[in-house]
Image (tube, rainbow, N blue to C red):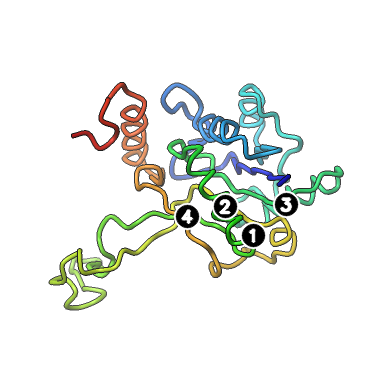
Amino acid sequence: MIRRLAVIPARGGSKRLPRKNIHEFCGKPMIGHILDTAKSSKLFETIHVSTEDEEIYKISSDLGFSPDFKRPDRLADDITPIVPVLKYVTEQYLKMGTSFDQVWLLMACAPLITSDDLKGAAALFEKHNGLNPVLAITEYAAPIEWAFDRDDQGRLTPLQPGMFSTPSNNIKPKYHDTGTFLVFSADSVLSSVGAGSDHGYIGAPISRESGIDIDSSDDWRLAEAVYRYRNSNNPNGFEGK
């Protein structure tokens, strides 16, 4: 039996959208959506909310996910990477006599992730024998070959001159991190140093709407619209006719 630990980081000091991880999103605190998805996936032996914040601790507990311990303040500032937080949580459980095979990072503000997304990533991780971490990715909305740099005066400089005339169907899709979830072996987390690495990942593709990165009020409104549409009685699914 594979023993999986899900860690949901939820510090109290988010800046761009203050306290977004507990702000109400479609009827419940934002963090409640990923907690429910993690539980319904039936993948995890333990689901732990990593927070230093009293209010987030209470809300998580009220939702049925009382953290076994708090995050120390030294790991809850604006500059601490996520990997040291995962390492701390995994080490704390070891001190409590509990070990895991896999450590999953589930972001608190990922309300559109589904159980199927998580199950697909689990299968992919096991297909590769747990030798490579798995990262949730999605396609860029437009070819990155069409990208411009923009200076202070608004002038545009193509990053790949001449590519503007290449049709998108002749350009291989590129992918980006959705900022929603990752899968690691517990051994790799425990042996990690600093922020870790951005090499060696296996990509788990998810839909662009599932991977909406909620960093602004526009992102929030878009995510709410997608969530409500998904949960409407629309018989044709998200795409419609």
Q: 126 and 118: which one is in front?
A: 126
Mark 3 surroundings: few (<14), some (14-19) or many (≥20) residues within 10 A: some
Give, as a three-letter code, the residue at label 3.
Answer: Asp
Q: Residue 181 in the image: x percent, y percent?
A: 53, 49
Relative to 62, is 17 on the left or the right?
left
Closest to the observer, 183 or 17? 183
* Label 4–label 3 contact, CB within 8 A: no
Amino acid type shown at disc 4: Ala
- The answer to whether residue 171 is above or below residue 206 is below
In the rendered image, the vertical position of residue 52 relative to residue 142, given as above or below: above
Q: Do the residues labelled 3 and 1 touch (CB within 8 Å)?
A: yes
Marks 4 and 2, how far apart in space?
A: 28 Å
* Residue 78 numbered tag: 2
Pick the quarter of the image with the C terminus: top left
Looking at marks 1 and 2 on the same chain, the residue that comes earlier in the sequence is marked by: 2
Residue located at (48% from left, 59% from top): 203
Looking at numbered disc 2 in the image, what kind of residue is underneath it? Asp
Disc marking residue 101: 3
Q: How many residues crowd around disc 4 within 10 Å: few (fewer than 14), some, or many (20 or more)?
A: many
The residue tagged 4 is 204
Residue at the spot 44% in from the left edge and 40% down from the top edge: 17
Q: Earlier in the sequence, mark 3 or mark 1?
A: 3
